[in-house]
Image (cartoon, helix red, strand yellow):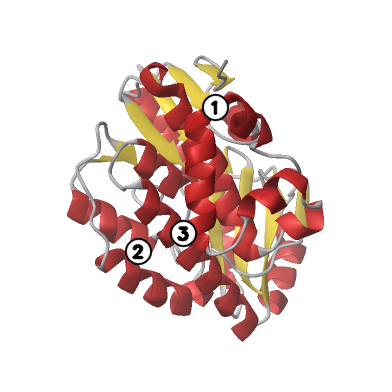
Amino acid sequence: MKAYVFPGQGAQFTGMGLDLYEKSPLAQELFEQANSILGFSITDVMFEGTAEELKQTKVTQPAIFLHSVILAKVLGEDFKPDMVAGHSLGEFSALVASNALSFEDGLKLVSTRARAMQKACEMQESTMAAVLGLEDEVVEEVCDSVDGVVVAANYNCPGQIVISGEVEAINKACDILKEKGAKRALVLPVGGAFHSPLMEPAREELAKAIEETTFNTPICPVYQNVVAKGVTDPAEIKENLVSQLTGAVKWTQSVQQMVADGGTEFIEVGPGKVLQGLMRKIDRNVAASGASFE
């Protein structure tokens, strides 16, 4: 069974999407539509902007979403998923690619999400840290033992977890995790504590937008981050999507469940190869590749 997976924030690169734009009339049409929906020329930043310009929150998330979704649309008849999933932001790409959301609604929600997260980041100083080489349970126990807000936020692959929370609590957790034998416990250059309780103001704002948006039954199960299982019911999809901003990205668990449900070929749709790398660490027995078009 074919599983299509969609990357999240951090996969952006300068010039992203330009090859799609130049080779496909459909891609051109969708990119121009995106410029109109967003009210600024995101294609200028994607195709010609600097790495710094691409890092702007209002640009990064829509840019990755557009690259992923438009690539899926351009694949056309070749895009035949039996199951889909997306890492954090990538879940929105997966929902549009599987027809649970329209292109326009998906882009509007991603834009709302990006701005809401930016605002939440500015309300309180917070950060995230990558922890390598420890069991999930050890990381969770340390987070629970530290005063202040610090939680396991991204279960990327066995032995790689990202924690999220208040700066002081993150620093304290990193010190303890190193004592516990972590190969690395490294604070990341991010704007704030994504997938933690500190994103509650953003969750509330996004929840309102999601509630007002029409969701359809997808063409295949969508393995959502917060539940790590295939979902097809639109009401359940909306509920899980709202929970995602303050809940953990259970990527390891999602991929393991997809494999258990019959996934044998995993195809990354969008910029970069991050998910292919994680896939090989989660389960070496399944094929992992990137989507390509002619």
Q: Please provide percent x and percent y for residue 54.
A: 72, 55
Disc 2: which residue: 242
**What residue type is disc 2 on?**
Val
CB contact under 8 Å: marks 1 and 3:
no
- 236 vs 130, left or right, is left
Secondary structure of residue under mark 2: helix
Rate crowding at label 1 as few (under 14), some (14 to 19) or many (20 or more) other CA atoms within 10 Å: some
Of callouts 2 and 3, which one flags the residue occurring earlier in the amino acid sequence? 3
Instruction: Indicate the quadrant containing the C terminus: top left, top right, bottom left or bottom right.
Output: top right
Q: Please provide percent x and percent y for residue 108.
A: 42, 60
Disc 1: which residue: 24
Residue drawn where x is 54% and y is 27% of the image: 24
Mark 2, mark 3: which one is toward the viewer? Answer: 3
Q: As displayed, is residue 87 above or below residue 129?
A: above
Disc 3: which residue: 37
Rate crowding at label 3 as few (under 14), some (14 to 19) or many (20 or more) other CA atoms within 10 Å: some
* Quadrant position of residue 231: top left
**What residue type is disc 1 on?**
Ser
Residue drawn where x is 78% and y is 49% of the image: 184
Residue drawn where x is 79% and y is 52% of the image: 51
Q: Please provide percent x and percent y for residue 182.
A: 73, 49
Secondary structure of residue under mark 1: loop
Q: As displayed, is residue 123 above or below residue 210?
A: below
